[in-house]
Amino acid sequence: MSSGGANYSMVFQRSGFRLLQGTPNVYKAKPTSGGSFFCGSCGVHVFSGPDSSPQLIAVKVGSLDDRSDFKVQADIWMKSAPPWHRAHDGARQIEGNVAATPPSPGSPPRA
């Protein structure tokens, strides 16, 4: 499988990320893919770190204890979205991947 349905991630500067417990298992589709990190106990996908933007980390929203403040700011890879996928109201539509630097808090995402 090369993709799936929508998933929600929050992109942060890697320097501001700290894993509080456990040791994740990593999967790399190819040596330069950066890796997807999975919980070492239950196997859930927790975060990703692309080699193309090593300063960033994408944390899966579902792994957060409190998701109440999460608001979709951008829909990415919309060029390849299936026709039944609806864009989020008020979210920026980006055809491919996001820029290498995440926006500062409160600012709109960049393409």
Image (tube, rainbow, N blue to C red):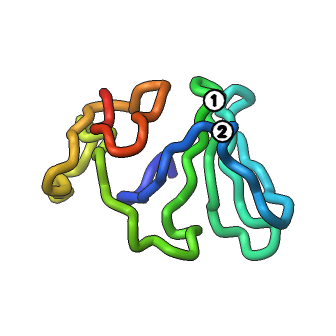
Is 40 on the left-hand or right-hand side of 78?
right
Answer few, some or many: residues within 10 Å of disc 2's Cα (few below 14, many 20 plus, some between 14 and 19). Answer: some
Q: Position of residue 37 (x, y in %)?
A: 70, 53
Q: Position of residue 111 (x, y in %)?
A: 30, 27
Task: Give SS at disc 1.
Answer: loop
Image height of 66 relative to 72, above or below: below
What whole-number distance in Å separates the C-alpha atoms at marks 1 and 2?
Answer: 5 Å
Q: Quadrant of residue 80?
A: top left
Q: Are marks 1 and 2 in contact (CB under 8 Å)?
A: yes
Q: Residue at x 31, y 38 (%)?
A: 107
Q: Position of residue 43 (x, y in %)?
A: 71, 69
Image height of 77 relative to 17, above or below: above
Mark sitting earlier along the chain (1/2):
2
- Look at mark 2 in the image and give the residue it sits on: 14
Q: Quadrant of residue 77?
A: top left
Task: Give SS at disc 2.
Answer: helix
Image height of 46 relative to 53, above or below: below
Identify the amino acid type marked 2.
Answer: Arg
Q: Residue at x 50, y 44 (%)?
A: 11
Answer few, some or many: residues within 10 Å of disc 1's Cα (few below 14, many 20 plus, some between 14 and 19). Answer: some
- Look at mark 1 in the image and give the residue it sits on: 55
Q: Residue at x 18, y 53 (%)?
A: 87
Identify the amino acid type marked 1.
Answer: Gln
Is 16 on the left-hand or right-hand side of 103?
right
